[in-house]
Amino acid sequence: MPRLLPAPIGGGFRWSQRQAVTCLERPVGDLFPYLRRDEVSGGREVRSVTDTASRVEHPLSTSLYPLLPGLSAAWSHAIIDDKELFALQKNLARYALAMKELSLAEVEHVAELAQLDLSDDEKELFRRQLSSILEYAERLRLLDTEAIPPTATVLPLENVMREDCVQPSLPVADVLANAPAAEANCFRVPVVLEGEG
Amino acid sequence: MDLAYAPLARVQTLLRRRELSAVELTQAVLDRILALDNEIKAYLTVAPEWALEQAEEADRRRASGNDSSPLLGIPLAIKDLICVEGVPNTCGSRMLENYIPPFSATVIEKLRAAGAVILGKTNTDEFAMGSSTENSAFFATRNPWDLNRVPGGSSGGSAAAVAAGMAFGALGSDTGGSVRQPAAMCGVVGVKPSYGRVSRWGLVAFASSLDQIGPLARTVTDAAILLGVIAGHDPRDSTSVDTPVPDYPSFLTGEVRGLRVGVPQEYFGEGIQPEVEAAVREAIGTLAGLGAEIVEVSLPHTDAALPVYYLIAPSEASANLARYEGLRYGLSLEGPDLWQTYRRTRGQGFGAEVKRRIMLGTYALSAGYYDAYYLKAGKVRTLIRRDFDQALARCDVLVAPTTPTTAFRLGEKVDDPLQMYLADLFTLALSLAGLCGVSVPCGFDQNGLPIGLQIMGRAFDEATVLRMAHAYEQATEWHLQHPPLRANG
């Protein structure tokens, strides 16, 4: 089990490979014996991680924050064993992949998919805000969901059958009343196909 | 009007005894709206002439001897996301500023059939996307308890109107907490029915697997009466469930002896305002005093609810809001071709939060990211549901705070979407699981701002949740306090 040690004060976290974090609420004085015990058993202290792609070194507190739910910037280093170090590296690799900030081009591509005109200011604002929201969402990656079916609706799906008969519907004039342009009982739309109109 | 805060049952008695007419009652509420709403800004549209017509109709119906409905002649407010035929339905958006629905939602048909008087449409965050009602394209609504603070959201207009005595009840809609959260922040009762309990036909869609219409009221009994009228199967909504609607008020016996109340440990601790935790802990003690059995439970995936919700709801929203293209209804800004008409209309018609969520949802659903975001969120949603299934197999209800903090100041969180999303922290998981919940007032902080107790229950077991809420309410006096408004006299 790794020990994530707080700086300067706080409780203690235990972090298992697969599951998220459980808070163990330990008094401060308790932490040093743990540190010593791990040194004896060959655990290693991790104070920072390096993004192998960019070669940028991050202090553990900030770089691990999105990886471990419940972890805050108050944590400075962790004691982990070899197996856990391997798991951490694996997580970091996945994390580094996902953690690249959105580029302006990606924002423009998404805006095009969504059929939204955005101003330059909006593009930059959304680039930053979406990056930070997606970073927050990264914590879901730590949950093992390989054998879990997704929920799209909470209701059991079943076909609903009914008689195929004509029901009263709204008068055409009422339906068209909110349309910006209407003609001959139809919505009037701009030319759809080139060369016609 | 000393009746402004009267419970429905008392008003109904006065109406039945002919000591008061529906027209007099409606006029008095309209006068109060005129006196108060310039400051509070709960309503986007008030329909005074139509309201008085409905009241006259109610008086005629009563005179003809047909007065068994508990809502006959009762003035109500409706969130501006629920269509009422002939009354503008803006959804708090420039996109639908001039949209007049040609039909009424099923819940409106039910309220009208019960003889209720619809006063008007209340303010909401644009397309219900927000937690403070500040995302309305028109104006922010203010909290009646402190006009410098938000009423919560997105059903903030409905909550503020009920809290200020500007309606005897209201409808809101709850996707991730939009009824419970503003109810807590405005000191009123708010019910999020189980997914499928109330027809969504005529409710403008935000996130279709989560949206539910729910009542807001000043007492649990009033909320139970309203829920009883709007609940039930509707063939026009294929997700409404064909299961009997119990007579909710008959479950409000005050008796909770032997019921098991689970306290999920994850809803307490870090990030919660200490006064909120203290009030909720005291409320749990009150429930124990009433004979309920208190059990510690765990919902281990509570932390995941926020990221799951903010992937699933925007994904569904991005699909639902594709319908606003400037051709059939709503704003239309013509461009040189069809595509530019779409983009211009949507770029100008939607506000910042709506665009942000459409972008987020589009990204989460796009090729290459679907598995990592939308599908992953759906799988974790299953884990969240299992947590509740396990806890509710041992307990009849779960109790927790409705919100981490009391109402915050206007403008405090508008520039930081993630901070704003955290205001829904305690209401999201229940929505994702499709279960039912109630927020009931359980105290005040040092600034005199209301605190809400959230009572959560099994799917389609609103009766037990309301019974617990009612027993708590009757054992306390929080619901008898009203905001310090000048018009109170």
Image (tube, helix red, strand yellow):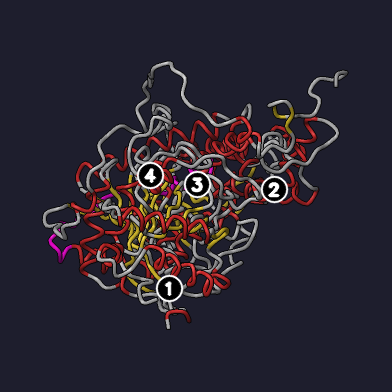
Marked residue chain, label 3: B
Answer with left or right where residue B275 lies relative to residue B468: right
Report the magenta residues as a range: B288-311
Measured in 3D between alpha carbons, the distance from the residue under mark 4 to the one under mark 1, in whole angstroms, is: 34 Å
Cβ–Cβ under 8 Å for marks 3 and 4: no
| x and y, in percent, of residue B440 in the image | 32, 62
**Residue B261 numbered mark, or none:** none
Q: Find disc 4 in the rendering and name its residue.
A: B110
Q: Badge 4: few (under 14), some or many (20 or more) residues near its Cα, within 10 Å?
A: some
Identify the residue shown where x is 32% and y is 47%. B229
Q: Is residue B277 above or below residue B207?
A: below
Say which mark, if any, is on residue B449. Answer: 1
- Calculate the distance from the C-alpha at mark 3 to the C-alpha at mark 4: 13 Å
Q: Residue at x 13, y 58 (%)?
A: B255
* Pointer 1 chain: B
Q: Residues within 10 Å of mark 1 (few under 14, many from 20)?
A: many
Q: Residues within 10 Å of mark 2 (few under 14, many from 20)?
A: many
Q: Nearer the viewer, mark 2 or mark 3?
A: 3
Q: Earlier in the sequence, mark 3 or mark 1?
A: 3
Residue B358 in view here = yes
Q: Is residue A186 above or below residue A79?
A: above
The picture quadrant where one finds residue B169 is bottom left
